[in-house]
Amino acid sequence: MDLGSEVILKFGSNEQKKNFLLPLAKGEKGLGIAFAESEDEKDLSSLSTISERRGEEYFLLGAKRFVLNASLADSFITLYKEPGEGWTTLIGEREREGIEVHPIEKMGLKMISFGNLLLKEVRVPLANRLGREGGGMAHVHHCHQGMGLRRSSSGLGYLSGGF
């Protein structure tokens, strides 16, 4: 369960790579992404979840819907609207006070868990910000490119009899 690992690999600090990617590679932790708040995970214009920087911390408020692997992930790469213009990407650990995970029961696709994240004044240290402030859209595009490549290579493997 490595959704978003390519974002940390490309944009994360050495400390973030050590803290999040190493346990992920060992199978000790899971990672999820929470970018959009719409059903299709693509409409970023409706983003209302906000982050407010106060000193060396961010305070998060809002909700993320239809988060892949929400009930299994230990950390989430999340996109937040800043008070001014732009978006910031933060890594929020599941055990932080104020994060609630609500699994979604579905009729199909039971092998993939979905859930909603409710964020109530969640405090995230500045050290958990990916890249620079306002650089969040580059992270979203990079993640979606990686997911597209995975889908394409999986389809090619199927067509060539690799499955």
Image (cartoon, grey):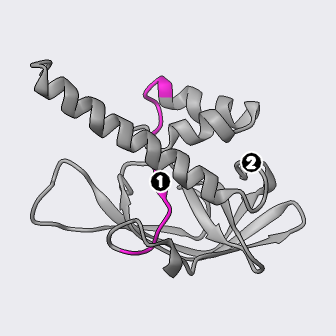
Q: CA distance from mark 1 to mark 2?
A: 16 Å
> In the figure, 144 relative to 49: above or below?
above
Residue 161, by quadrant, is top left
Residue identifier under label 1:
33
Q: Position of residue 151 (x, y in %)?
A: 29, 39
Residue identifier under label 2:
131
Q: Position of residue 70 (x, y in %)?
A: 39, 57
Q: Main secondary structure of the magenta part?
A: loop
Q: Nearer the viewer, residue 32 or 101?
A: 32
Residue type at numbered disc 2: Gly
Q: Could you tell which of marks 1 and 2 lies nearer the N-terminus?
A: 1
Q: What residue is shown at x 43% (from left), y 37% (from top)?
A: 2
Whether pointer 1 and pointer 2 mark residues with C-beta atoms closer than 8 Å, the reply is: no
Viewed as shown, does residue 7 lie left or right of 126? left
Total marks placed: 2
The local crowd at label 2, few if under 14, some if 14 to 19, many if 20 or more residues have their Cα within 10 Å, is: many
Let me know if residue 76 appears in the view: no
Q: Nearer the viewer, residue 61 or 146?
A: 146
Viewed as shown, does residue 13 lie left or right of 154? right
**Secondary structure found at label 2:** loop
Residues rendered magenta in the picture: 25-38
Residue type at numbered disc 1: Ile
36 part of magenta stretch: yes
